[in-house]
Image (cartoon, grey):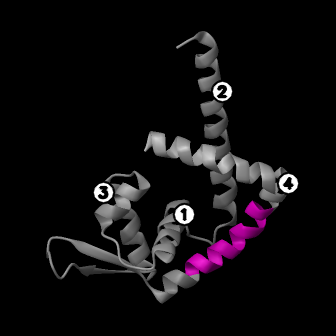
Amino acid sequence: MSETSNTLAIMLFSEILGTDQILRSRLGKVLPKGMEISHFSVLNHLAWRDGERSPAQLAETFHVTRGAMTNTLNKLEWAGYIHIRPDWDDARRKMVALSPAGRHARDSALSTIAPMITQIVEDLGEDKARSALPILRELRNKLG
């Protein structure tokens, strides 16, 4: 790798990491009290998937350990946001589903986040935001 490529790579990843840090900080401030970004992410995923997922599938989706996902799921279950049941075909596994309270919490969180992220996209411009998506998706796929 040339020095120019190395510098470009460092600059690219520095921007991504910096953006991630700022975004997480801003999201953390507007999410409903007690809700963490990881909680919202799981609730949002379950709302979009509109079905059950195993904890292992969720851990794989979010690129976290099963232990980390179990911790998040325990907190969500305690809050009443998800239902965890045994897998009827394999008693060693569990299945996770969004509860009505979880859908409401996700919708409420989304309504608090939407103005902030919408404003960012408007400030950036729809064309720029749309053109960034394929690059970010490809980068995520290569890293995943």
Q: Earlier in the sequence, mark 4 or mark 3?
A: 3
How many residues crowd mark 2 within 10 Å: few (<14), some (14–19), many (20+)?
A: few
Label 3 sits on a secondary structure element that is helix
Asked if labels 3 and 2 touch by Cβ distance under 8 angstroms, the answer is no
How many residues crowd mark 4 within 10 Å: few (<14), some (14–19), many (20+)?
A: few
Residue position marked by numbered label 1 in the rendering: 36
At horizontal 38% and vertical 52% (from top left) the residue drawn is: 64
Label 1 sits on a secondary structure element that is loop
Tell which residue pokes out farthest to the top in this image.
3
* Image location (x, y in percent) of residue 55: 31, 66
Residue range of the region highlighted in magenta in the rendering: 105-118
The CA distance from mark 3 to mark 1 is 18 Å
Q: Earlier in the sequence, mark 1 or mark 4?
A: 1
Residue 11's disc number: 2
The CA distance from mark 4 to mark 2 is 23 Å
At horizontal 60% and vertical 24% (from top left) the residue drawn is: 10
In this rendering, is residue 141 above or below 100?
A: above
Residue position marked by numbered label 4 in the rendering: 123
Say which of marks 1 and 4 sits in front: 4
Say which of marks 4 and 3 sits in front: 4
How many residues crowd mark 1 within 10 Å: few (<14), some (14–19), many (20+)?
A: some
* Image location (x, y in percent) of residue 132: 69, 47
* Image location (x, y in percent) of residue 68: 36, 56
Say which of marks 3 and 1 sits in front: 3
Q: Earlier in the sequence, mark 2 or mark 3?
A: 2
Prevailing secondary structure class for the magenta stretch in the rendered image: helix
Q: Earlier in the sequence, mark 2 or mark 1?
A: 2
At horizontal 29% and vertical 62% (from top left) the residue drawn is: 56
